[in-house]
Structure formats: C-alpha cells, structure tokens
Image (cartoon, rainbow, N blue to C red):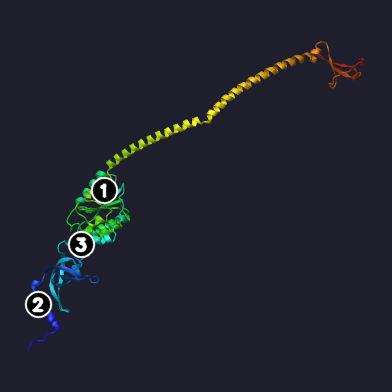
Amino acid sequence: MSTILTVSQINTYLKSVVDGDGNLKNIYVSGEISNFTNHYRTGHYYFTLKDEKAAVKAVMFRTAAQRLRFLPENGLRVIVRCSVSIFERDGVYQLYCEDMQPDGAGALHLAFEQRKDKLAKMGLFDEDAKHPLPLLPLRVGVITSPTGAALHDILTVLERRFPAATVVFEGVQVQGDAAAPQIAAAIKRFNELNGADVLIVGRGGGSMEDLWAFNEEIVAHAIYDSSIPVISAVGHETDFTIADFVADCRAPTPSAAAELAVPDTRELLFQLDGTLDRLTQLTDDACAARAQTVQSYAQRLHAASPLRTLDAAGTLLSLQTAGLSSAMQAVLHRYDRAVREAAVRLDGSSPLRILSRGYAAVTKKDKTPLRSALDAEVGEPVEIRLADGRLRCTVDEVLHEKG
C-alpha cells in the first residue's frame, strides 16, 4: 500500500533534494529582468528572470542588494550568481541571488549612467545653477589626497602662475568607502568657514572603481550646494565622473584645474601694460580733441566777443573825449578871455582905483555908506577910506550943497 504524503511533506522533500544537489549551488544564470519589485521596507528585490522560452522567479535579499552599484530594472539583461531552492509554502522553486552583473555593460558603468540620468533630472547639472570662477582668487581651496601626485601638480602650477594666492588645503581619502563622506564634509566645511574663493576637488587618474567616490550622490549634492565655485579635477582627460557634471567647471587633470583656478601673473602684467598704453593713447587723443574743441570755441568766442565791441566803443569814446576836451579848452579859453576883459573893465571902475586918484569913501559906524551930507549928524563918528588906509573922524559940521 502506498504512503500518503501531505503537501508540506512533498515540498519539504523536494526542497531537501534541490538543496542537496551541488549542481544547483553557486551557479551563474543569464536572463532578462521582468516584474521587478524593490521592496523598500525590507530592502529585498523580487523579480522574474526569463529568456525566450522560459521564466523563473528570483529574489535578492537586502544584504546582497546593498552591495550592488546599480539599480536593477525591467528589460535589463543580467548574469546572476545564485543558488536554486524551493519556497516551501508555495511549492515554487526560485533563484536566491547573491550577486548580479549587467550582461554586456559593466555594473559600474550601468550605475554611473543610472545615477547621471537621475541627477540630471533633479537639475544638478543645469548651467543656470553654476557659478562663474573669480578673476583674481586670493585663496584657493584644494581638496584631495595629501599623498597623491595631484596635490604636487596643483601646488606647482599655482606657485608658477599666481604666487599671490594663498593655498588652503584639506587632505581627504579619494578612494574607498570613506572617501565620499570625507570629500563631501570638506566641501561643506569650506563653505561654512568661507575658507576659499575657489575650490579644486579631485585626484589623479585611475580605474572607474578607483574614481567611484566622485560618482557618489553625497559628493554631487555637496558640490551643487556649494556657494564657493568648484572646479572638478578627477582623473585624466578621458575620465568623466558625476562630479565633473555637477561642478561649476570641469578640468581634465589636476594641473589643468590649477591653470583654470588662477590667472597667469606674467600675462596679467602684459595685459596691464597693454591697457596702460591704450589708456595713455586714449587720454592723449581725448586731450587733443578737447584742445581742438576749446580752440574752436575760443575763436568763435573771440569773433563774437563783447570785448571787440568794447574796444570799438572805447576808441569812439577816446575820440569823443578828445573832441570834448578840445571843445572845453576852446570854451574855457573864450571864458578866460572874457573874464580878463571884464576884469580890466572892472578894474577901471574899481572904487580902489578911484580912491587912488584922491577920492575917499565915507561910512558910518555901522558900515553904512554915507551917500549924502544930509545923512550925517554933527558929532557922529565916521570912517573915511583912502587908497592907502582909513581915517576915523567925527562930524564937526554938516555943510550941504544943493545940486
């Protein structure tokens, strides 16, 4: 008689058989992902792996999923390292994945492209968000490894091109799990302390794995949030990282970053000399033009100057003054001659001249002229004026002679 088994017994038996088969342990399976579910609460990935003829369910638990550099997605062809087992509850066999690689493109390359697309959609690469580099930075911040060749290259170029700048250096790891947090923290610290006018963030070249710290989102956001302009100097000319796309300026090498960060002192002096020559020439030309303008205005002003009218009026006034003076002289001469003639006539009729001929003038005590003998009284004092003196007399007798 056959043994009666339960469903659980069958599933348990099949699971033990499958689990005991070494051919189903640590195997590699290729296929295309479909029905992908990212269980965010647990961190587990659930999906179906299929090819042209069949499909199988698969799961990747959180501990394995966290190690992936990229995010699986529907339609992606992958190669998974897994073991086959049976999920007893449903009696379904499935793949339990420990690792996953894109079939064709490498995992890092895929992760890079996915992250680049994500951050681009977030606006971290927008040109409008980028800061212009300062023309004359007096403090250049450098964030890189203290032991790498990149630091030596940067310092050499800065000293040669612009020794006036002060270099503010912060050493960080540029490779490994601790690199990205250190780089992001250094950028944030420079901004909090306003420690530089421009920042150079980078390292020398290397593999994509070596440069991966500069592809991490924490570094991308730190560069994007920086109020200090950031120059990304990661790797060699053919290497690109997420930091290159977010930074305000991308340099192909650390040396090139230093070239971009500061001006060349010799070139500045040459430009300054040229500018001074141009300013001198412009000043000379402007002064010559102004002098010509002033001369033109002076000529026009002279032509319309009131001084010319005043000069003409002065000449006329001089002529009129001379004529008036001549006329006055003539008038004065006539009056002088008339006065002289009148003086002669006056002198001829002068009382003094009459007195000199023996006549006398008699006045009373109050100086009243005595014109008639009847005006005098006996005993009245009178004064007799002669040509050479006066006589004071008393009237002894009045003798009136009728005319």
Question: Tags 3 and 2 in contact by the CB under 8 Å rule?
Answer: no
Q: Is residue 403 above or below residue 166?
A: above
Question: Under tag 2, what secondary structure?
Answer: helix
Mark yes or no: residue 325 visible: yes
Question: Under tag 1, what secondary structure?
Answer: helix
Amino acid type, mark 2:
Val
Residue 131's label in the rendered image is none
Q: Which residue is mark 2?
A: 17
Question: Under tag 3, what secondary structure?
Answer: helix
Circle nearer the viewer, 1 or 3? 3
Q: CA distance from mark 2 to mark 1?
A: 66 Å
Q: Is residue 20 above or below residue 176?
A: below
Residue 260's label in the rendered image is 1
Mark nearer the N terminus (3 vs 2) = 2
Q: Residue furthest bottom?
A: 1
Residue 134 pos. (x, y %): 31, 49
Amino acid type, mark 1:
Leu
Residue 111's label in the rendered image is 3
Residue 145 pos. (x, y %): 22, 54
Residue 249 pos. (x, y %): 27, 52
- What quarter of the picture does the N terminus occupy? bottom left
Mark nearer the N terminus (1 vs 3) = 3
Q: Is residue 330 above or below residue 54?
A: above
- Taking the image as shown, residue 40 lies to the left or right of residue 315, namely left
